[in-house]
Amino acid sequence: MVLLPGCENTPQVSDASITSLLREQLIDLQAAPHQKVLLVDVRSADTFSAGHLRGAIHIYLPQINGSDPRLLAATAIVVYGSGEGFDPLAHAAVKKMLALGYQDVYDYPGGIKDWLDSGAELADVSHPLPAAQP
């Protein structure tokens, strides 16, 4: 079991606590009635600005906290990265959110690569969505 630094007083979260979603499951979750799915991109801010999943926000891993109104308003949180193999940032972000008490937090390990491989498009990068505030 691995604990994130600074999370000693929070519930312990193991790799077994993480639920991964396939692209089809993500699409179904987004289409479900009464769901407010928040997509969280944990790649670098520059990479996020170059292209991200439509509706995603960017959160830098150290900025994840238990009082972020965007996270609190979500009924489900889906974290993704590049999809180029195991993504330690996405994995750590999911674990941190679970340790902070967020419910229904999922990993989308396919990330950008899986999304593009399916023929889906990224958000209009000429009008990127706002990133997390420092």
Image (cartoon, rainbow, N blue to C red):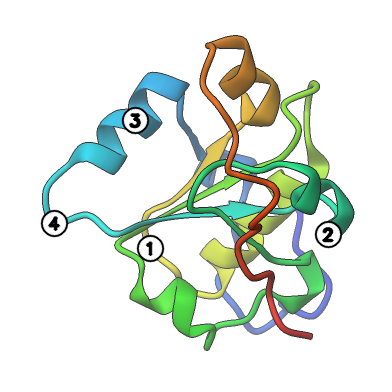
Q: Secondary structure at mark 3?
A: helix
1 and 2 marks in contact (CB < 8 Å): no
* Element marked by disc 4: loop
> The residue tagged with tag 2: helix, strand or loop?
helix
- Front position among marks 4 and 1: 4
Numbered marks: total: 4
Label 2 to label 4: alpha-carbon separation: 30 Å
Rendered residue at 70%/46% (across/down):
90
Decide: few, some or many residues near mark 4? Use Cα within 10 Å; few <14, some 14-19, many ≥20: few
Count residues near mark 3 (Cα–Cα under 10 Å), then give few for <14, some for 14-19, many for 20+. few
Q: Which residue is mark 4?
A: 34
Q: Choose the circle earlier in sequence order: 2 or 4.
A: 4
Asked whether 56 or 123 is in front, the reply is 123
Image: 101 above or below 41: below
Type of amino acid at the residue the image marks with label 4: His
Q: Quadrant of the C terminus?
A: bottom right
Spot occupied by residue 97 in the image (x, y as percentages of width and height): 57, 65
37 above or below 110?
below
Q: Earlier in the sequence, mark 4 or mark 3?
A: 3
Which of 96 and 31 lies nearest the eye of the viewer?
Answer: 31
Residue 119 point in image, percent of width and height: 54, 12
- The amino acid on which the numbered mark 1 sits, given as a three-letter code, is Gln
Q: Which residue is mark 3?
A: 27
